[in-house]
Image: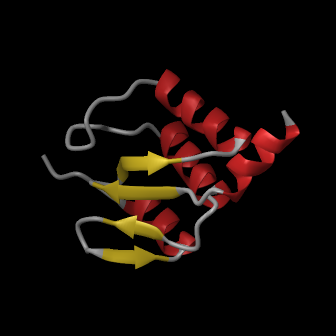
Amino acid sequence: MFAGKEKRMEEKDHITLKWGTLKSWDLHSDTTIELSQKYFSLGRSSAMVQRDTPEQKELICQMIDECNADTIYLEWDGIDATKEEAKKYVREYRRIN
């Protein structure tokens, strides 16, 4: 069991953000998996129409902090952002409709 957990921790995670929310992800640690389960338990649709609650935005930011990756991909901008830049993007993104 320990070897399996250790292997998961060695795997690189990734998070892609678009429209201020999660577009794609591959997370391996128990903590990031638990955070994503909490996020999805609050309701989820496609990234294009997702309207995250403040609690969901905070869970995304926690996933970003715990993510075993150096950068987070911002799809609209086509850039790898620092974790701080990615969290700012999530917290400040506003939809116009």
Out of 80 and 8, give the one closest to the viewer: 8
| Residue 38 placement, left or right of 95 | right
Name the image quarter holding the N terminus: top right
Out of 97 and 59, give the one closest to the viewer: 59
Q: Residue at x 72, y 38 (%)?
A: 30
| Residue 7 placement, left or right of 18 | right
From this view, report whether residue 38 is shown above or below residue 2. above
Residue 39: x percent and y percent? 52, 33
Residue 53: x percent and y percent? 44, 37
Residue that protrudes farthest toward the right in the picture:
2
Residue that protrudes farthest toward the left in the picture:
97
The chosen color scheme is secondary structure
| Residue 42 placement, left or right of 69 | left
Out of 16 and 49, give the one closest to the viewer: 16
From this view, report whether residue 82 is shown above or below residue 48. below
Out of 54 and 24, give the one closest to the viewer: 24
| Residue 94 placement, left or right of 84 | left
Q: Residue at x 72, y 52 (%)?
A: 9
Residue 76: x percent and y percent? 23, 67
From this view, report whether residue 1 is shown above or below residue 73. above
Q: Residue at x 62, y 37 (%)?
A: 33
Question: Would you identify the image quadrant in which residue 69 lies?
Answer: bottom right
